[in-house]
Image: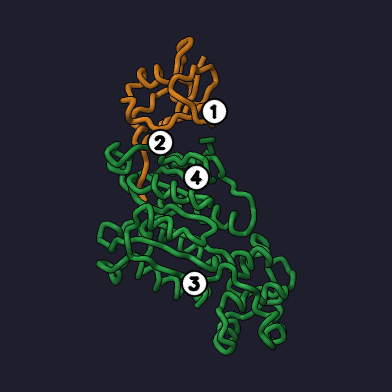
Amino acid sequence: MNITIKCFASLARFTPAEADAFPLAPGETVAELIARLGIPPEEIKLVFVNGNHVEVGTVLTPGDRVGLFPAVGGG
Amino acid sequence: MEPASGQESGFAHVPGLAQALSRLSRQETLPDGRLRPCLPLAVAEELALSLRLPLAQVEIAALELGIAPERYLRNFDTYTLAEQALLLASSVALVGLGGLGGYVLELLARAGVGGVTAADGDEFAPSNLNRQLYCTSRSLGGFKAAAAAARVERVNPAVVFTPVAAFLDEANMARLLGGAQLCIDALGGLTDRPALARAAGAAGIPLLTAAVAGQGGYVATVLPGQPSPADFFGPEASAPAENTLGTPGPAVCAASAILAGEALNILCGRAPALAGSMLLFDLSRMSFETVRL
């Protein structure tokens, strides 16, 4: 069962090849997913699942849309 | 000149204004074939001069008579006559006059937002030329606030623009926000954004905030008491994405257009479309999505 992953801005370099159909491990949390993607946790400031801001302890379910957003401040 | 906010309609008090507006307006045919009474640009400015009235007040008086000032003609029906009058009587605080702030100010001025108080203590440098609308070979080295004031005067003299060529601490942010209906965060970097969000919350007004990195960015509307995106980002030391991706013009301009569109939503009396939400965009994939914060 799969999820979709979107890595924004400077996190784009961590986007997995199968971002639109990424295999989910059973019971996997956002934090575990972040570790599996090799993203330093401190680089992620906001996590969205299905369009809602969530904490990294959130357990993911098949079909979830995960968005990872870094600190962005440019103007 | 008095600030536009709280301004009363002129025609009820100024002898002859209503008659002059009716006499000097002309019928314009809109692209869909409708006729609309229109106040020619030069006539509006001459009336304001001859009657010693603020231009915005003359335009509001015309709008209340069902006459569209010519410069706003192409906004109908997106902004109705009544909404245009609200815009002319509205007042905004804008912090930052660089990349985001320049484009936002340009759009607010062209829309006829009657009062804009804007602060930036910075001067234009050559590295601003990639994205900052008011940074040109002529304005390099000068205050951004001064270039903005000169531009607004040329774009729309109905706008009462108050430039503040200073960097603001939180107390001065609070002063800048006094009397404004909403605050626009057009700052660069992460350092000052949480303080501005606090100041807007304390003033009880909506904060519109945006930031970009590379081809992506966000725009959010923060109502008093709600969290702001910058609250989650930490201080400048947290290496924001623009430190590597930079701030190219298209993302800056896109974020500014969304900021201005949302500002006009609010100022003409509609519900903010992004309240409690962030619009995330990425021009490299042309993706736009709205998430709840």
Is residue B34 something that shows in the picture?
A: yes
Disc 4 target residue = B220
**Where is residue B24 drawn, in percent x and y?**
67, 86
Discs 1, 3 touching: Cβ within 8 Å: no
Kindly identify the amino acid type of the residue bearing the numbered disc 3.
Answer: Val
Q: How many marks?
A: 4
Kindly identify the amino acid type of the residue bearing the numbered disc 1.
Answer: Asn
Q: Which chain is green?
A: B
Discs 1, 2 touching: Cβ within 8 Å: no
Q: Are there few (<14), some (14-19), or many (20+) residues within 10 Å of tag 2?
A: some
C-alpha gap between disc 4 and disc 3: 26 Å
Disc 3 target residue = B160
Disc 2 target residue = B232
Q: Are marks 4 and 3 on the same chain?
A: yes
**Where is residue B53 drawn, in percent x and y?**
57, 82
Q: Which mark is residue A50?
A: 1
Q: Are there few (<14), some (14-19), or many (20+) residues within 10 Å of tag 4?
A: many
Discs 1, 4 touching: Cβ within 8 Å: no
Kindly identify the amino acid type of the residue bearing the numbered disc 4.
Answer: Ala
Which of the chains bears the disc numbered 1? Answer: A
In the displayed structure image, the side of residue B276 where residue B193 appears, left or right:
left
